[in-house]
Image (spheres, rainbow, N blue to C red):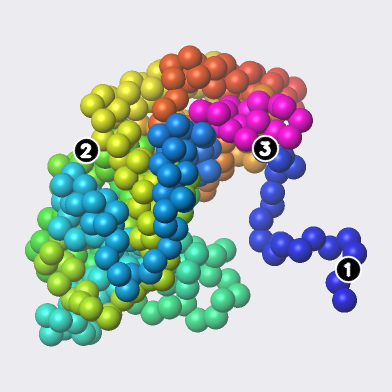
Amino acid sequence: MTDANAQPLYDTFARADLRFERGEGVWLITENGERYLDFAAGIAVNSLGYSHPHLVETLKAQAEKLWHLSNVYEIPGQTRLGQRLVDNTFADKVFFTNSGAEALECAIKTARRYHYVNGHPERFHIITFEGAFHGRTLATIAAGGQAKYLEGFGPKVEGFDQVPFGDEKALKAAIGPQTAAILIEPIQGEGGVRPVPDEELRRLRKICDENDLLLILDEVQSGVGRTGKFFAYEWSGITPDIMAVAKGIGGGFPLGACLATAEAAKGMTAGVHGTTYGGNPLAMAVGNAVLDVILADGFFEHVQQMALVMKQGLASIIDRFPEVVAEIRGRGLLMGIKSVVPNTTFVQALRDEHLLTVGAGDNVIRLLPPLVVTEEEAREALSKIEAAAERLSVTARQKIA
């Protein structure tokens, strides 16, 4: 018998006391009609905002045909979306999943199988970096290595060797006869919007080549136009061997993918990996619709321009409110405000201004607007950030006085 006052859901989320009924573009509307400018976008998921007409019509049309089949049969939408990803990236092969964590699981298994079929089953260790976040499965929390996510779930999954972020000496010392790959986010999102410098990614590529290691990129948050290119790795001029993708690729529909070169994926033969829902017709229809928009001429340039507007405006806010804002981080429309006051306080102050954001590690507030945000909307967001910073500044000065 349950407590009459208990709610039926797991108590794993500290939810805000907000209920949204519908969305329009970059706006969310509550049940009582209040409008919020959404610069969280479902944590970088709603890449094209809400009620995008092309996505809505595509989903409705596919829903009247087929929702799910399973991978027992050919799914033409998979072939089309896979080919478009191959044509526009480093990859030769694609495996579709439902989430970023599943895409990372596939990437980890792909790297281990590569060395296994090459006659080195002992090479299954993957080097990761402090502050990383790769998902919530047992393997991906082990890869991330953060104690708060590992606590209480038994022994840590074997095979992940973590080194400090940006410490090349520690990285090279961690490479041994069991090492299979290096796994890194081009921009740590959950870890505090910490970009990996382009020269560092080039150095990692060189280290992998010299040691017969696979380079795995986690672009779950940084990919699909978020930084102003299709994928963030393009800024550095290097290519990975394996890459995990999710979030923005579905525009709000659960969809992920693991991309790999033919060489890296050669161990992933029939029967060694699978998924029931991954790559279903509904997901493939929406994923293709997202790419129709993302890959259109001028789209990435628009993201870069909106990022410049935001960066310039935020720089001005830092200058005027140093007791509230310490630093601006990120690339493209994956931006972070390093806060002086507790980031939870800042997030609430922004919410009071009807601007939605999301926190991150290292006392950072993430700004992740839909990529279709207009200049007018970007400037409205900046106005709300300024108003929140001004109120927090008054409070901070009063405490000092």
Is the stretch drawn in magenta largely helix, strand or loop? Answer: strand
Residue 371 at x, y percent in the picture: 40, 31
Crowding at dot 3, Cα within 10 Å, few <14 / some 14-19 / many 20+, comes out as few
**Residue designated by label 2:** 235
Numbered disc in front, either 1 or 2 = 1
Q: Which mark is residue 21?
A: 3
Q: Quadrant of residue 391?
A: top right
Q: Magenta span has 79?
A: no
Question: Please, what is the three-letter code of the amino acid marked with disc 3?
Answer: Glu
SS class, disc 1: loop
Q: Is residue 30 above or below residue 258?
A: above
Segment colored magenta: 21-38
* Badge 1 or badge 2: first in the primary sequence: 1
* Badge 3 or badge 2: first in the primary sequence: 3
SS class, disc 3: strand
**Residue designated by label 1:** 3
Q: Quadrant of residue 9?
A: bottom right
Question: Please, what is the three-letter code of the amino acid marked with disc 2?
Answer: Trp
SS class, disc 2: helix
Residue at horizontal 23 percent and vertical 67 percent from the top: 181
